Image (cartoon, rainbow, N blue to C red):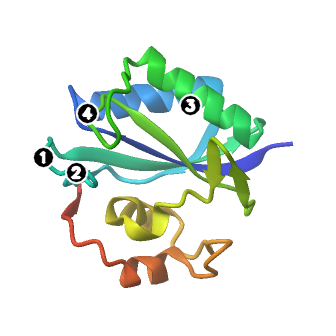
Amino acid sequence: MKSTAILLLGGNLGDRQANLKKATHEIEKNIGSIITQSSFYESQAWGKTDQPWFLNQVLMIATPCSPMQVLEHALAVEERLGRIRTEKWGARIIDIDLLYFENQIIDFENLIVPHPGITSRRFVLEPLAEIAPNFIHPIIKKNHLQLLAECEDTLTVIRI
């Protein structure tokens, strides 16, 4: 049986669009099939702002994997594509975050779902509102359009 998961892809080093496309290909090979994907979004860096702008995209996938397997495969994809973790919120070639897994609420030491940053980050909410506007956040009980309207993040996010 397959579950629906929503992933956020992002990066701000190298050929950002090519890196997101490579990550999408690796996700299809190793995690699950793409149901739908958002446009690309260019955004100012969040958290550590003195770095190049990011390119982000959200994927909705059908996966036979468990949430922990999705995380493990996503980390392996990052590593294969050259991700080196040096500092929190630092520049990176690729980042893959598990935003949602069905309507599950997961609180493990190394995995929290829904991702705790969803509601405070415009670069996450813009593509979520594009592909899943009426999806209800299982904890906050609001859809992505409502969360986007209430988001206090003022950093620039541009749909490409």
Please tell me which residue lies in front, 126 or 33.
126
Element marked by disc 4:
helix
Which quarter of the image is occupied by the N terminus?
A: top right
Query: Mark 4 or 3, which is nearer the eye?
Result: 3
Q: Residue 50, which numbered label?
A: 1
Residue lying at 51% horizontally and 23% vertically, measured from the top left? 77
Q: Are marks 1 and 4 in contact (CB under 8 Å)?
A: no
Q: Quadrant of residue 91?
A: top left
Q: First in sequence: mark 1 or mark 3?
A: 1
- Residue 115: give x, y in percent of width and height: 55, 56
Q: Which residue is mark 3?
A: 74
Disc number placed over residue 16 in the picture, else none? 4
Q: Position of residue 84 (x, y in %)?
A: 36, 21
| Circle 3: residue type | Ala
Badge 1 or badge 4: first in the primary sequence: 4
Q: Nearer the viewer, mark 2 or mark 3?
A: 2
**57 with respect to 98 (left or right):** left
Q: Amino acid at mark 1?
A: Asp
Q: Is residue 127 above or below residue 17?
A: below
Question: Residue 96: which numbered mark, if any?
Answer: none
Q: Residue at x 57, y 76 (%)?
A: 134
